[in-house]
Image (cartoon, rainbow, N blue to C red):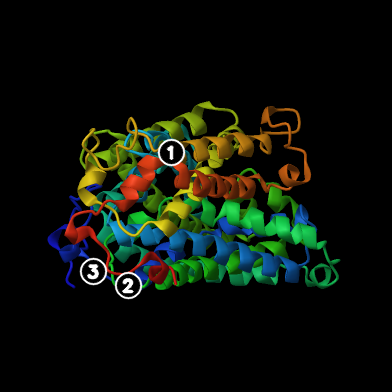
Amino acid sequence: MAASENDRVGSVETRGIEPVPDAERHGHASQMFWTWFAANISILGLPLGAALVSFRGLNIWQAAVVAILGSFGSFALVGALSIAGKRGGAPALTLSRAVFGVRGNAGPTLVTWMSRLGWETINTTTAAFALLALLDAAFGIRRNTVLTVVCLLVFIGCTLLISGLGHATIMWINRWASYVFGLLNLVVIGFLATTVDWGKVFHAQVGPVSSMVVGVGMIAAGTGIGWANTGADYARYLPRRIPGGRLVAASAFGAGIPLVVLISLGSLLAAGEPDLASASDPVSAINTMLPSWMSIPYLIAAFGGLLLSNHLSVYSAGLTMITLGIRVRRTLAVGLDVVVTFAGGIYFILIAKDFYGPFITFLTLLAVPINAWVGVFAVDLILRRSYDGAALMDVGRSSRYWFRGGVAWAAMIAWAAAIVVGLLFTEASTSATDVWFSGPLAHSWIGSNGLGWVVTLVLAAAVYALLRRLDGTVREEASAQPPQQQVLPAPAARELS
């Protein structure tokens, strides 16, 4: 089916969060492959692999297995949740209104928006550092305040251009930029591979199986789980007839291929550079491992990889902002988002003395409610057969998704309970002496090995599956029939097969 004027490459997407009509659906499942390939070709995957060796004591073969399971597995979940976008034609957090209620959905939406802004700020500041280093390496131009601001503006301008144009342009950019920056990454990877201390690699001791289990969780939490609530944003233009299994496979392989290569290389490098796993600025840490002539392609690749990831995050953040109730056009929402990101970049680069530690600590806390949302939303997706497009856009008492007082209490209770339990296993700190928050079970085996997110997700899913059966308003909504054009002919079980 041909694309509409609203979703053509180079044209500004005017659609906001309203569901995409069937007549405007187009494309193939392969779009999800390129979306997640582009988001994960950044050289910043190397420190994840280094951590498997330096912190978990795994050898290269164990690290490779962990990388495969964590990367492919977590993005298979992203692909599964993106089925909701194909099914309902709307962004993930807009579809979440059908799960939490038009008022209850405000909590998960606000948390998601804050998390997106946070990671965008990290991407922006890191990219600015990369661009500053590139100017120094290529032209001998030293860093100063004005140049720092210019570098921030260049990265934000590139992000705004791509994200502002919208879905079709993002899909096109993802595919072709993946070739360019992927090739640059291969050049850098090829050189880094020659620096590996192969003697230490092949003589490394086998780590415990328990460390492999923890490693899978660490990789999943650091890769796919962070994107789980955005997959539907990019699948909403796809035709309903596309099998859900293809979205799962395309997402898993699209992200898994570059991640496994980068994580495995990071594991190899850790044999000779154990400090790589704990570097506060991984771009600079890797740059010091390269000769001056290799720095230029490396820094270009790093900048490009961050840009490809950031424009996806900004696009989703704009949709999330509108879902939150800020009544602006999508393009303006994207503009507001990058303004906030620019202000954050100015503060953290030019004013704050310590950026990465405190900010990533804050984002660690936000990950708990996001994981709880994933658990609830996943169960609803399995049990739900359709979304009512008109009701998704109706935030008043007449909405089918009003439930009781605008809140679906089964979902809200499960979400809240999982957050509380998840925080019990969470410790947020910038160092051993600067602990912001430490749950009473943070130093248990689960907590100390970073598996609190698994407990959060599973508990949210289990509690919601139980309470959903007991909530009369949810049963009533599930039995109601949406408008005929919104009914899916295929059952959920077939789509998930």
**The label number, if any, that marks residue 26 in the structure image:** 3
In three-dimensional space, the C-alpha distance between marks 3 and 1, rounded to whole angstroms, equals 29 Å
Looking at the picture, which amino acid does disc 1 mark?
Pro
Residue holding disc 2? 242
Q: Nearer the viewer, mark 3 or mark 1?
A: 1
Front one among 150 and 379: 379
Front one among 36 and 324: 324
In three-dimensional space, the C-alpha distance between marks 3 and 2, rounded to whole angstroms, equals 10 Å
Secondary-structure class at tag 2 = loop
Give the quarter of the figure containing the N terminus: bottom left
**Residue 353 percent location from the top left of the image:** 59, 28
Residue holding disc 1? 108
Residue at 21% x, 57% y is 20
Residue at 42% x, 34% y is 107
Does label 3 or label 2 sit earlier along the sequence?
3
In three-dimensional space, the C-alpha distance between marks 2 and 1, rounded to whole angstroms, equals 28 Å
